[in-house]
């Protein structure tokens, strides 16, 4: 129904503006709708994650419906543009939600086919939409068309919203989702979401593009001229707002509107550039294409509609073929580079020549088919590129990002199309009109196709109109062809992903998910809005540190840390949305021991791949006697833990929220969780001391999270035992300042003296970060109780009798993240040797 509605109402645009005697203003609504609808997609992705799919879906259904109502009832071009903007915001948001659903329920290998398949309704509606549009235009008005769809679509959307809400409530009942109240007042909530959605950054970016591009449309309809003060002022202000937006994002925004670190991935950057280029090129000729074929080839409304639908039919059909190809070959880069882009460029180039009646409409259809097949390859290919580069867990943000660039590229295309139309059509029309009609050029220009079709075919005036249209389309096709050349480097930088091998996996589940049921039982989950002090994972600063292996325990942990380092660096490279980023690590020591001086490249902690080096004395800060730097990583733990949970669930993992009295009690939950027979293996990695391990201790840790973003992880080892540190959280998550190590201390609240000491130490030892304590922008104070096992980790299998086994993996204390993937690997080996072909819980 969305395809039918969109295909039908698109044909109303030209008719509406012709009714308003404002045909040249058509691009004004398109530019506004495309820019605002595109920029707002990033906040939409956040809304879906924060408020829920059902609530987000209903919100944008309301926006969509309001837009349709305004379109049906407006009295002029300004009201139509306002309704058009609201309509496109709602329409794009609804499609984004549906795309995310499709991506979440399909593997990467099948995703190109799945995306193409759900677009196939456009093939059917391509033939019905023009007929429906013509029926409305011939028998009632375009206003009734909008009004009818307003009622029909609401009836379609309501059941779908109910399904979203049903499964959301079901997830909450099962404990997968937990919607805790934030405890904020209405004013505090308003302030929180104001920063969370970066409203100022959003407005600045929209204003910059609108003010920069809109004057070209206003010039087209005579409201501004290139030499006018208003045109120049809007262009200048628009250009100046771009650096203002950049300054705001870098220095003032608490949460960045665009996650710029994602563009470090060359595939993501290339795909976004390709999206902008393709849509820029397409709209250079497409905006006035309906009016062009209607007038020049003297078609009926429905036949002209069929001409505009060739792209939809061809691209949707070929998208399915491309999806099958990707599933078969497991690659998508070279079909885009060697087939899709050259074919689209060929189609646009041939349109330069095959235009006007003298060549026949069949040649124009051929060009459209070429462009459609190329577009079906490229649009699906760029979607696959960002999802392959980011893995499936970052789908909402990645799709929003690619849609943003598509929209901005399209908006620039609209502006260029308007400029071409304004500078070619009127001049060609004035020159071609007979002398007795030259004075009527403005009326013919403003009246659009509805007035132009009234002139008899073959008359001198109609011939002049046809000539003006062919001249305008020629330059649009030239611009489109030239722009597509930029697509070659954009695709060339993509990685040649194998979509069958790309996705990262949680260790235990990855090994057993295809044969066994794997479930997580936890009292608290990363989705909780306010984790308790005992859920220390959400409060931590996480990084890798090069430290000497001076004891057998540290030597063992060194192996775990190096295994974790390799996995974390791979995640940082392949899935930047996971919250892990590669960065430099630095250690400064005030007291030097033999073990410290023995750190060197080749050690287990200073491995051959971590770029370890000892700092020269000239590089050491005051008071430090020895230092080193190495390749490390930082973790935004909130983002990372949610990413891991989504990855587990996406592969079919089960999650249940329970507070267990003991590790052994998990065996009894197998039947309740629907796992069939009673589970025979439980992995105990909670650290809750279920088995009364006498060595278990609690280490209280207090940290301060500040808004300022540092660029490396650095630790100072003071002679008096203090260990000031800066641990950045990637993705704009700020920086963890310091940490306390208080063994056996169970105090659950923030100690002001500890907070003050942490901040003062940071000022003293890291003066390049901040100069004064007052300069810190504190986001939150963190307190966590970390389970630590004196004498080292417990990683072993314990036979419980009756063929049941508990595999223990706990006691890392403050090094949980640093050792995590190494511990997971050992646990997998223990599960494998202990279980054999039995179920795992």
Image: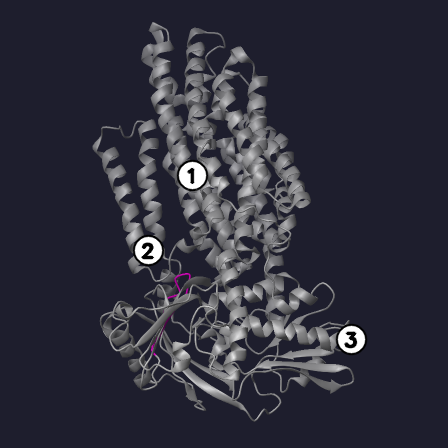
Front-most of 598 and 440? 598
Name the secondary structure under disc 2. helix
Name the secondary structure under disc 1. helix
Q: Residue at x 41, y 33 (%)?
A: 414
Q: Residue at x 34, y 50 (%)?
A: 203
* Mark 2 or 3, nearer chain start: 2
Mark sitting on residue 409? 1
| Numbered label tally | 3
Label 3 environment density (alpha carbons within 10 Å; few <14, some 14–19, many ≥20): few
Q: Residue at x 28, y 42 (%)?
A: 238
CA gap, disc 2 and disc 3: 54 Å
Is residue 726 covered in magenta?
yes
For residue 13, side relative to residue 160 (left or right)? left
Q: Position of residue 624 (x, y in %)?
A: 29, 76
CA gap, disc 2 and disc 1: 22 Å
* Mark 2 or 1, nearer chain start: 2
Front-most of 168 and 65? 168
Place residue 834 in its image quadrant.
bottom right
Relative to residue 447, is residue 16 depicted above or below? below
Place residue 230 in its image quadrant.
top left
Instruction: Assess whether mark 1 and mark 3 are in contact (beta carbons under 8 angstroms).
Output: no
Q: Position of residue 539 (x, y in %)?
A: 44, 75
- Residue 75: tell me if it is visible: no
- Residue 131: tell me if it is visible: yes
Q: Which residue is mark 3?
A: 677
Relative to residue 232, is residue 586 depicted above or below? below
Find the magenta span and give its range.
Answer: 724-736
Relative to residue 280, is residue 448 depicted above or below? above
Mark sitting on residue 249? 2
Q: Position of residue 154 (x, y in %)?
A: 56, 48
Q: Position of residue 554 (x, y in %)?
A: 50, 81
């Amino acid at each position: 129904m969305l395809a039918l509605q969109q295909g039908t109402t698109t044909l109303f645009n030209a008719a509406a503006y012709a009714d308003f005697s404002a045909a040249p203003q058509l691009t004004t609504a398109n530019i506004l709708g495309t820019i605002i609808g595109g920029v707002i997609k990033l906040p939409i992705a956040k809304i879906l994650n924060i408020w829920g799919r059902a609530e987000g879906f209903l919100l944008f259904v309301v926006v969509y419906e309001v837009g349709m109502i305004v379109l049906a009832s407006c009295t002029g071009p300004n009201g139509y543009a306002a309704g058009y903007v609201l309509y496109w915001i709602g329409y794009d948001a609804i499609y984004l939600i549906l795309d995310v659903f499709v991506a979440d329920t399909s593997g990467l290998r099948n995703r190109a086919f799945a995306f193409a398949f759900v677009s196939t309704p456009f093939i059917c509606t391509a033939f019905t939409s023009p007929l429906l549009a013509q029926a409305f235009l011939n028998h009632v008005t375009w206003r009734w068309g909008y009004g009818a769809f307003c009622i029909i679509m609401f009836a379609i959307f309501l059941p779908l919203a109910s399904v979203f809400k049903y499964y959301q409530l079901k997830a909450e009942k099962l404990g997968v989702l937990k919607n805790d109240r934030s405890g904020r007042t209405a004013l505090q909530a308003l302030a929180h979401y104001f920063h969370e959605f970066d409203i100022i950054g959003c407005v600045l970016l929209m204003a910059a593009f609108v003010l920069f591009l809109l004057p070209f449309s206003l010039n087209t309809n005579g409201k501004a001229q290139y030499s006018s003060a208003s045109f120049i002022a809007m262009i200048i202000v628009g250009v100046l707002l771009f650096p203002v937006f950049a300054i705001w994002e870098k220095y003032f925004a608490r949460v960045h509107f665009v996650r710029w670190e994602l563009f470090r991935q060359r595939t993501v950057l290339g795909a976004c550039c390709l999206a902008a280029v393709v849509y820029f090129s397409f709209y250079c000729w497409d905006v006035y294409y309906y009016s062009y074929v209607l007038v020049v080839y003297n078609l009926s409304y429905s036949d002209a509609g069929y001409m505009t639908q060739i792209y939809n039919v061809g691209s949707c059909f070929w998208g399915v073929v491309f999806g099958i190809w990707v599933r078969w070959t497991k690659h998508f880069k070279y079909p885009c580079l060697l087939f899709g882009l050259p074919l689209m460029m060929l189609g646009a180039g041939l349109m330069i020549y095959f235009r006007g009646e003298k060549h026949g409409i069949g040649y124009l259809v051929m060009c459209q088919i070429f462009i459609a097949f190329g577009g079906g390859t490229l649009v699906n290919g760029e979607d696959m590129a960002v999802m392959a580069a980011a893995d499936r867990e970052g789908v909402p943000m990645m799709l929003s990002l690619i849609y943003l660039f598509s929209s901005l590229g399209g908006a620039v295309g609209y502006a260029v199309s308007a400029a071409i139309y304004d500078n070619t059509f009127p001049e060609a029309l004035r020159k071609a009109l007979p002398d007795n009609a030259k004075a009527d050029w403005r009326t013919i220009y403003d009246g659009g196709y509805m007035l132009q079709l009234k002139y008899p075919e073959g008359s001198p005036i109609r011939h002049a109109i046809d000539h003006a249209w062919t001249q305008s389309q020629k330059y649009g096709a030239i611009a489109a062809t030239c722009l597509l050349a930029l697509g070659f480097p954009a695709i060339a930088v993509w990685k040649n992903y194998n979509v069958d091998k790309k996705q990262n996996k949680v260790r235990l589940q990855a090994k057993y998910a295809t044969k066994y049921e794997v479930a997580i039982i936890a009292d608290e989950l990363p989705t909780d809005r306010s984790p308790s002090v005992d859920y220390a994972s959400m409060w931590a600063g996480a990084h890798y540190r090069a430290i000497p292996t001076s004891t057998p325990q540290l030597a063992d942990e060194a192996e775990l840390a190096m295994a974790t380092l390799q996995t974390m660096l791979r995640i940082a490279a392949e899935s930047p949305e996971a919250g892990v980023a590669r960065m430099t690590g630095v250690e400064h020591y005030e007291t030097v021991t033999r073990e410290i001086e023995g750190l060197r490249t080749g050690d287990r902690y200073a491995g051959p791949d971590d770029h370890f080096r000892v700092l020269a004395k000239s590089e050491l800060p005051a008071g430090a006697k020895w230092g080193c730097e190495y390749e490390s990583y930082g973790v935004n733990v909130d983002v990372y833990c949610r990413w891991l949970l989504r990855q587990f669930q996406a592969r079919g993992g089960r999650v249940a929220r329970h507070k267990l009295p003991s590790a052994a009690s998990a065996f009894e939950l197998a039947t309740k969780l629907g796992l069939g027979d009673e589970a025979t293996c439980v992995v105990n990695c909670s650290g809750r001391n279920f088995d009364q391990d006498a060595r278990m201790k609690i280490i209280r840790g207090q940290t301060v999270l500040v808004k300022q973003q540092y660029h490396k992880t650095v630790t100072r080892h003071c002679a008096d035992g203090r260990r000031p540190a800066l641990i950045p959280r990637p993705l704009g998550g700020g920086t963890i300042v310091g940490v306390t190590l208080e063994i056996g201390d169970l105090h659950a609240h923030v100690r002001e003296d500890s907070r003050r000491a942490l901040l003062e130490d940071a000022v003293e030892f890291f003066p390049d970060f901040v100069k004064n304590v007052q300069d810190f922008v504190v986001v939150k104070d963190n307190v966590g109780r970390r389970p630590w096992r004196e004498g080292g980790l417990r990683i072993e299998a314990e036979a419980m009798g009756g063929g049941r086994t508990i595999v223990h993996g706990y006691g890392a204390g403050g090094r949980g993240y640093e050792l995590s993937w190494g511990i997971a690997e050992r646990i997998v080996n223990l599960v494998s040797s202990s279980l054999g072909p039995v179920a795992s819980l």
